[in-house]
Image (cartoon, grey):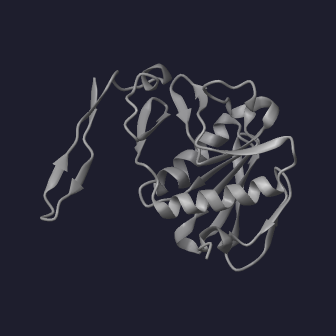
């Protein structure tokens, strides 16, 4: 059995602990994950190593929502943009991207998880706790899984969007797109927007 103990500071900055006991032991498998408690955390696997992410912050959710609306508005009818779907690559590799673009016809046949070959685009919105994973680990993992397109969104950079395109077994790039300029990204379909839109308040 494995145990995680999230800590949070009190007014006196004294840590309090909340133990979550997880079935299984490292290296973990997808079968182990399916037996994990529904405790509000996001659990992913990279070669059997467990990555635990807390619920997204309001800013993180805002960027995801703005980008999903932009993409869904531009997508052709046969494609859809979805959030936090399960992607199973092997029994020791299991990912949950922030956003994906997939064919609707594929979604109709998916019950629990997509395969990497179902995804046309995977997107991660970087947070302080996920930056090392999103900038390095997921670049390598998504390329190895054969996901053709990966966007990394960096909110604290304006935001900026880093676009990686699969070239053989690794990603070329990334191409960098800054806030303040209208950009047109051609794949998986043409979409035009200013990255600054992702962080603007609706009012």
Residue at figure coordinates x 39%, y 27% from the top left: 36
In the picture, residue 179 is in which quadrant?
bottom right
Residue at image position (66%, 35%) is: 145
Occupied quadrant, residue 118: top right
Q: Quadrant of residue 185?
A: bottom right
Pick out the residue farthest to the bottom: 180
183 or 18, which lies in front? 18
Looking at the rendered image, the quarter that the N terminus falls into is top left
- The structure residue drawn at horizontal position 75% and vertical position 28%, both measured from the top left corner, is 108
Taking 130 as reference, is 194 above or below it?
below
Look at 27% across and 46% down and name the residue there. 6
Residue 137: where, in percent of width, then height?
A: 52, 46
Can you give x and y, in whole percent of width and height, for residue 10 in the image?
Answer: 17, 60
Say if 37 sits above or below 191 in the image.
above
Left or right: 189 in relation to 82: right
Answer with left or right where residue 87 lies relative to residue 46: right
Locate the C terminus and report the quarter of the image it occupies.
Answer: bottom right
Report x, y in % for residue 110.
Answer: 69, 26
Residue 75 in percent (x, y) is at: 83, 51
């Amino acid at each position: 059995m494995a145990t995680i103990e999230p800590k949070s500071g009190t007014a006196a900055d004294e840590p309090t602990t909340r133990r979550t006991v997880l079935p299984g032991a490292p290296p973990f498998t997808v079968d182990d994950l399916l037996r994990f408690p529904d405790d509000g955390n996001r659990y992913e696997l990279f070669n059997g190593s467990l990555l635990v992410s807390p619920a997204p912050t309001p800013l993180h959710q805002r960027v995801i929502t703005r980008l999903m609306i932009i993409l869904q508005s531009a997508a052709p009818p046969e494609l859809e943009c979805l959030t936090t779907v399960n992607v199973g690559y092997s029994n020791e590799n299991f990912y949950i991207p922030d956003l994906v673009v997939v064919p609707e016809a594929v979604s109709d046949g998916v019950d629990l998880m997509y395969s990497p070959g179902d995804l046309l685009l995977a997107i991660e919105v970087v947070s302080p706790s996920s930056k090392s994973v999103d900038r390095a680990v997921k670049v390598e993992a998504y390329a190895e899984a054969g996901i053709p397109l990966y966007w990394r969104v960096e909110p604290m950079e304006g935001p900026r969007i880093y676009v990686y395109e699969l070239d053989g077994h690794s990603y070329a790039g990334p191409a960098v797109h800054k806030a303040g300029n209208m950009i047109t990204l051609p794949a998986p379909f043409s979409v035009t927007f200013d990255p600054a839109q992702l962080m603007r308040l609706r009012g």
